[in-house]
């Protein structure tokens, strides 16, 4: 009898422990689906609702050409091979090229304006194509090649490259002041952003040859419509003056720039 009572007590204790576990709110396998929070939406009262909130200082704020790799319009117009276009050192270990495709991009999307060659040497068609770009165009280069290792090591390269004026546009108050304006202007609005809801926001704009801001447009959402609106407004209301870009002849030209926000993206 005493043995049965002992077993019953152990069973009750085990069930109580399991019930306690099920009531515990921080299970390691608990999956929380975080969704974008509208600017006029109240936060949930649950402590879990604040786990994915991003601090403003953790967000990316950057203004530059569309792609990290760049080439001046003058250097592009003088290029005879893809080696002349690609970043310095990118082709040092390449022995031979099997083909090269050069394309004009629409943002980061390859268009049907493209031309092929049998090796690294640009054809007349390819030269005409790249010379047709303006001072803020974007191009794409793809090539298969063999390394200098001598082991018949085949590989390929792809590069997204922004064409920039010989003298790029300059914000007269300095780059740090520009970024400070963007952060200050959007400080309150970005507080709704969560880690899972954030996307790579991009706002494209032009610094005209007269030194003004024009053609401001959202090209990639941040994941929050209210934040997107503020991002566009921060560019449209940049205070101060710009020194416009100029080409190889010294003539003033328009330059297209991109405001990257939130996280890095393609």
Image (cartoon, rainbow, N blue to C red):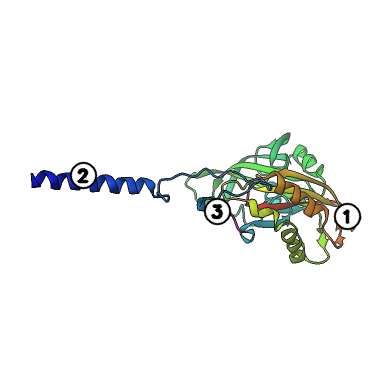
Residue corresponding to mark 2? 11
Residue corresponding to mark 3? 50
Q: Is residue 261 visible?
A: yes
As rendered, which of 8 and 130 lies closer to the eye? 8
Relative height, residue 187 to residue 162 (above, below):
below
Left or right: where 113 falls relative to 250: left
Left or right: where 257 falls relative to 200: right
Label 1 or label 3, whichever lies nearer to me, is: 3
* Contact between labelled residues 3 and 1, with CB atoms less than 8 Å apart: no
As rendered, which of 9 and 57 lies closer to the eye? 9
Relative height, residue 26 to residue 122 (above, below):
below
Say which residue appears at 62% left-offset and 53% top-offset: 90
Magenta part of the protein: which range?
50-55
Left or right: where 6 falls relative to 68: left
Residue corresponding to mark 1? 212
Q: Secondary structure at mark 1?
A: loop
As rendered, which of 214 and 254 lies closer to the eye? 214
Label 3 or label 2, whichever lies nearer to me, is: 2
As rendered, which of 92 and 226 lies closer to the eye? 226
């Amino acid at each position: 009898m005493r043995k049965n009572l002992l077993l019953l007590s152990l069973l009750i204790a085990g069930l109580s422990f399991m019930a306690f576990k099920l009531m515990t709110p921080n299970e390691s396998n608990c999956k929380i689906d975080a969704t974008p929070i509208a600017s006029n939406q109240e936060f949930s009262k649950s402590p879990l609702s604040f786990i994915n909130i991003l601090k403003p200082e953790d967000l990316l704020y950057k203004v530059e050409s569309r792609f990290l790799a760049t080439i001046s319009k003058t250097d592009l117009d003088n290029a005879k091979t893809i080696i002349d276009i690609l970043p310095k050192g990118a082709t040092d270990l390449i022995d031979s090229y099997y083909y090269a495709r050069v394309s004009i991009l629409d943002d980061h999307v390859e268009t049907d304006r493209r031309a092929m060659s049998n090796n690294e040497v640009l054809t007349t068609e390819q030269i005409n194509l790249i010379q047709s770009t303006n001072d803020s165009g974007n191009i794409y280069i793809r090539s298969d090649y063999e390394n200098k290792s001598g082991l018949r090591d085949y590989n390929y390269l792809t590069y997204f490259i922004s064409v920039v004026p010989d003298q790029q546009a300059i914000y007269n108050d300095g780059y740090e002041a520009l970024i400070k304006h963007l952060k200050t202007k959007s400080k309150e609005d970005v507080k709704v952003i969560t880690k899972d809801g954030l996307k790579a926001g991009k706002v494209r704009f032009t610094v005209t040859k007269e030194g003004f801001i024009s053609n401001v447009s959202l090209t990639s959402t941040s994941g929050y419509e209210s934040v997107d609106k503020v991002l566009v407004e921060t560019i449209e209301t940049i205070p101060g003056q710009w020194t416009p870009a100029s080409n190889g002849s010294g003539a003033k030209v328009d330059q297209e720039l991109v405001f990257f926000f939130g996280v890095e993206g393609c």
